[in-house]
Image (tube, rainbow, N blue to C red):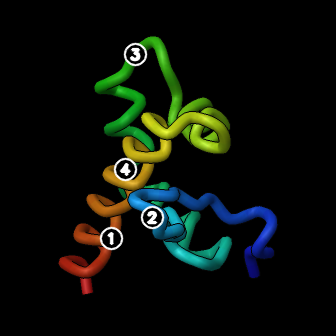
Amino acid sequence: MKHARDALYMASNGIVQPIGPGTDEEWAIFESLVRDEYNRLHPDDTFEDLKRRARFSKEDQGLLRDWMAIAAHRAAAAV
């Protein structure tokens, strides 16, 4: 299970929200749904780099949040 200190959060308008799912297993599933597409659309970047930058960049937090929303949508459609 993902520890609170390892989770990614985004603060918007004073509200702190987690980015993506709460467990390592869910992260792995969600990532597998979007990682290849992200890497294809951003040839000079990787999904791992995006996750690393999201720890300190609001822009990258928003981008990661958007990709995780796409993954959540795809996961829900697959069920």
- At horizontal 61% and vertical 33% (from top left) the residue drawn is 53
Residue 72 numbered mark, or none: 1
Q: Find disc 2 in the rendering and name its residue.
A: 30
Q: For this view, does 52 lie left or right of residue 35?
A: right
- Which of the marked residues, 4 or 3, is nearer the chain's N terminus? 4
Residue 29 in sight here: no
Nearer-the-camera pick, 21 or 17: 17
Whole-percent x, y for residue 19 in the image: 50, 63
Q: Are marks 1 and 2 in contact (CB under 8 Å)?
A: yes
Q: What amino acid is at disc 1?
A: Ala
Whole-percent x, y for residue 37 in the image: 32, 38
Q: For this view, does 67 lie left or right of residue 19?
A: left
**Quadrant of the image containing the C terminus:** bottom left
Q: CA distance from mark 4 to mark 1?
A: 10 Å
Q: CA distance from mark 4 to mark 3?
A: 14 Å
Q: CA distance from mark 1 to mark 2?
A: 7 Å
**Quadrant of the image containing the N terminus:** bottom right
Residue 34 numbered mark, or none: 4
Nearer-the-camera pick, 13 or 67: 13
Q: Are marks 3 and 1 in contact (CB under 8 Å)?
A: no
Q: Are marks 4 and 3 in contact (CB under 8 Å)?
A: no
Label 4 sits on a secondary structure element that is helix
Q: What amino acid is at disc 2?
A: Phe
Residue 43 numbered mark, or none: 3
Q: For this view, does 1 lie left or right of residue 11?
A: right
